[in-house]
Image (tube, rainbow, N blue to C red):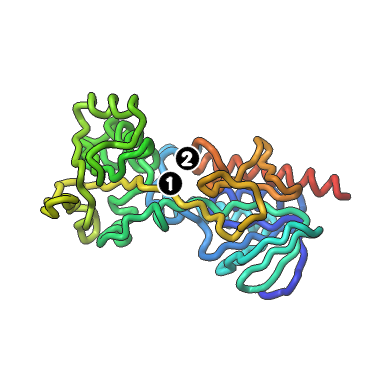
Amino acid sequence: MNIENKQYDVIVIGGGPAGLSAALYASRANLSTLLVDKGVTGGQVATTFWIENYPGFPDGVGGPELIASMEAQAKRFGTEIAVIHEVLDLDANQSPLRLSTTEGNFLAKTLIIASGAEPGVGKGKLNIPGEDTLRGRGVSYCATCDGAFFRDLDVAVIGGGDSAIEEAIFLTKFAKSVTVVHRRQELRAAKVLQERAFNNEKIKFKLGRVPVEIKGETKVEGLVVEDVNSKASETLDVKGVFIFVGVQPNSGFLKDNLDLDAQGYILTDERMRTSIPGVFAAGDIRQKQLRQVVTAVSDGAIAAVEAERFIEGLN
């Protein structure tokens, strides 16, 4: 697609569950809808092997399969999908809004930003051997999503903040043991979380260590950690590695256009409205408590309904 300045009622940025849900609802409301994504659709879900907690699938569903169904459904109602369109800039100081991408510029009456947040890039990535090749095969960034796959197995959690310790405690519901690996000699998590972790007989600690390699060919077979002082290394016999060292919201293209929190997440109200009229946000890119597929699709539906109402107001 390379139609300069083509105008739509709704442009959705991001092809994950939130974006596809928003596109579905917008298209079904007879709004001309374009979904743009810098890669293939799906977001994090596309790289999630199996999802067991999405309603309607009692035996679980493959991430790629779920996304393919969502995409087909959105297209059936008329959504245009343009992948390999990286968003460069947003001009929200005009009506219609102007979106600049690597493949051209587009105009829209409303915009829904569903560009997500990525735990496997930027500050949320370890960048060690085995991390990329074993992602989805024992390497995970979401205990809530994948914890049940590691029932009665030994796993490791990387990180020492609130998220890491909360997820370590959660994993003890399934795992035989959980080893927390943290580069500092002390955890950074809240004291109440530390107490719960230290009092949990399933949780062990490797403090003052950093992960240097995740071993395995087709699945995780071990984790090599190194002492930050002596540089001595050892291999932990684990079958899963859960990484919680930060998440990077995909909001860099927004620059100073919208109100963001200190971490770069978009601030919205419960109706998904941002600081700019006609611009909405949905899914993991929002500042929110729970980031799951089910909450993402809910956000997308709300954003699309609000976009429809906004357009009705313009008319």
Q: Is residue 3 left or right of residue 43?
A: right
Judge left or right: residue 163 versus residue 152: right
Q: Residue at x 72, y 55 (%)?
A: 10
The structure residue drawn at horizontal position 68% and vertical position 45%, both measured from the top left corner, is 274
Q: How many marks?
A: 2
Q: Is residue 168 left or right of residue 265?
A: left
Label 2: element kind: loop
Say what secondary structure mark 1 lies in: loop
Verify CB contact (< 8 Å) between mark 1 and mark 2: yes
Q: Amino acid at mark 2?
A: Tyr
The percent coordinates of residue 289 (x first, y second) are 51, 35
Going from N to C along the chain, the mark reached first, 1 or 2, is 2
How many C-alpha atoms fall within 10 Å of the one at disc 1: few (<14), some, or many (≥20)?
A: some
| Residue on which disc 2 sits | 54
Q: Which mark is residue 18?
A: none
Position of residue 168 measured from the top left corner of the image (x, y, whole percent): 30, 36
Front of the two marks 1 and 2 = 2
**Which quadrant holds the N terminus?**
bottom right
Residue under label 1: 61
Quick one: 99 or 21, which is closer to the camera? 99
Toward the front, the furthest residue is 229
**Can you say whether 282 is above or below 37 in the image?**
above
Residue 118 horizontal/vertical position (percent): 45, 53
What residue is drawn where x is 39% and y is 42%? 145
* Identity of the residue drawn at 66% across and 50% down: 258
Q: Position of residue 293 (x, y in %)?
A: 50, 43
Q: Is residue 46 left or right of residue 97?
A: left
Res. 111 in view: yes
Whole-angstrom CA distance, mark 1 to mark 2, is 8 Å
Q: Amino acid at mark 1?
A: Val
Confirm whether residue 69 shows in the render: no
Between 244 and 3, which is closer to the camera in this rendering? 244
